[in-house]
Amino acid sequence: QELPKVWSPRPLVVLDIGCNKGYTSAKMFSTFAPQLNFNAQSLHTSVRQALAGVGAKYSGGECGVCGDCHEKDVNQERAPANWPVPQVHCVEPSPSTFKLLQTTKANLVTTAPLLENGWVLHNLGMSSSDAPLLFSGPPNEPLACRTAGQETCGLVLDPSAPAPPGAVTVNGSSVASFFTANHLTKVDILKIDAEGFDPMVLEGAYSVLGGDAVKVLMFEYHGIGKWKTIDLKGVVERLDSSGWDCYLDGAPEMVRLTRCWTPALEFKWWSNVVCFKRDASPLADTVLTKFASFLTPTPSANALQQTPASGGPGSTPQHPLHNTKEKGPFQCPPVLAAKQAGALAAAKKRNWKFSACSDAAWLKVLPLMWDPRPLRIMDIGCNKGYTSAKLFSTFASSLHFNAQTLHGFVKETLAGKPISGGACGVCNDCTEGPASPTPAGWPTPTVHCVEPSPSTFALLQRTKARLAARDPILQTHWLLHNLGMADREGMLLFEGPPREPTACQNAGQETCGMVDAALATLAAIKVNGSSVSAFVANNHLSKIDILKIDAEGFDPMVLEGAYSVLAGDAVKVLMFEYHGIGVWKTKSLQSVVEKLDVFGWDCYLDGSPELVRLTRCWVPELEFKFWSNVVCFKRDESALVDFVLNELAAFLWQ
């Protein structure tokens, strides 16, 4: 966004290596030629049409793993008028994805003819030499290179070994050779996304990067492919010797790498690195002074330790107030992280349900902190509907849909039938008192209630009919879906645990969960499945203000199908359950929290009533694998995330 301000207008040349579906190219054209209307939204429409429904069946979907299609066209109203259309070389090794790009380009050119010469497509693999290259998908997606738009098609590490199934041979080139073959004297922006082989592509680019032909360099860093054995530190130091300043490219802060190195930066996790040539001094200086905000001093651990604690929700905190917009995400000093963990242990000892049956104190403040708007909410694992009731009670208190009225209808329908949790719910949900009256101006929210069990879905249908008889607006605002949620679309199997094998046949039973086909018994039922990203697309949802997931131990799998949406700004609050069954047996909460942090989320254990900070406050004691609820807040909701941290994370400040 800064480049059109810092650079003088000129015909830019961009090299987009690992072009895939073209979202980086779209971002470049959106920034420097917004009049062409080649942006994330127009590209998504074209890609989705070309894939014709195939997108949700592979990693990333047609929207991209990072939710690229949700990116706003930020420069539409303020891009300088005198910038010529750039030329973007889109380099993609997968033949099937290359054909997708050709189809997409043909569609876009009909409304923007300048793209015919402005967006140049190359079916080519990039490496350190010009030899033919072998590309294949990972073991769990062997046909990735033969599936259009798949984001996991990568170079084969050992081309002398037998070719894996689904492998394709592609013409290869180095960046230096590409320059020569295409008569390029400069590339203003060089982007590399080579599925773990970025170091190899860089090897073929260093001769170019040593001069002044390239001004901005972008590449991906993690722990697969060549990054397993090559250190980011070595790459950064080599680039430094050629006049480059490198940063981790964050959301939105940048983390300085060059001459600011510490071992903690070698974390080998999905990240993006951006480097700026120091001869472009106004740009290099702007980045350092404007975006490397983590270098700004913050309160010391001692200062935080010695400051009195907050007086609790609704009071004026007496500790130093954190401002996320100014200082970036809050980072716990070790002394505070340890103190918080000790307070949590004491709270769990006093009340074993501390986070298993939370108060959701944060929910009560949303109508006060958010501007009134027609909310869209997704309640996955709706069961008898108590979470839906809590949400309607909070945002539409004038309706008669709350815990008490819901309990009356559920109890009447179940007629005393014994099920785990009973008609009131395991956490005695039916006893929750009415919420405070919703402030004036709030329209009725729309809640998508997603429930896999056919018998419980029938219970919800009967309950809705009774509620809608009194409040007809619920007919169109409480939408029921008999659907299982996972990481992709397809048929799913659901079954109760060994002690309750027919849980999925009993209306309102809370232990009906997903089961692997190899472990399923005759009691298992088949249910249509979807991912969150596919559900959002199929239901034409541009946003989900609150996303709640309760998948009986398969929450990590549902999250896998939601990350492309969570990476964008469509969701503001995320809730999920954590314990030690299902996928949580082997999946760590720490890894989920860290992945969400990358996407701009602050996560907490949702307690009674305190919230326990997880993001950047992690200690091993938090991986306790017991029934708990987690709530996360998108950092672009800065007023809300600061309120939660400063007012509700009381264990940090006591």
Image: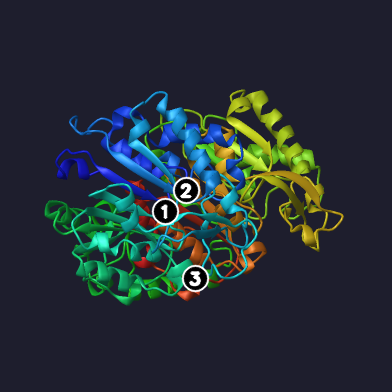
Q: Name the spot of residue 474 as percent of width and height, x first.
A: 60, 28
Give SS at disc 2: helix
**Colouring style:** rainbow
> Where residue 429 sits: x, y (%)?
62, 49
Q: Residue at (26%, 70%) from the top-left corner?
A: 238
The local crowd at label 1, few if under 14, some if 14 to 19, many if 20 or more residues have their Cα within 10 Å, is many
Which residue lies at the image location 20% right of the left edge and 70% below the top edge? 241
Mark 2 or mark 3: which is in front? 2
Circles 1 and 3, Cβ within 8 Å, touching? The answer is no
Viewer-proximal residue among 156 and 431: 156
User: Spatial distance from mark 2 to mark 1, Cα to Cα?
Assistant: 7 Å
Say which residue label 1 marks. 599
> Which residue is the site of mark 3?
622
In this figure, which residue is indicated by the disc labeled 2? 566
Residue furthest to the right in view is 522
> Disc 1 marks which amino acid?
Phe
Q: Note whether 380 is above or below 29 in the view shown.
A: below
Query: In 3D space, how far apart are the residues under numbered discs 1 and 3 (Cα atoms)?
Result: 21 Å
Above-or-below relation of 162 to 644? below
Circles 2 and 3, Cβ within 8 Å, touching? The answer is no
229 vs 582: above or below:
below
Local secondary structure at mark 3: helix
Q: Secondary structure at mark 1?
A: loop
Is residue 218 found left or right of 558 in the rendered image? left
- Decide: is 364 above or below 201: above
Res 320 visible = no
Cβ atoms under marks 2 and 1 closer than 8 Å: yes
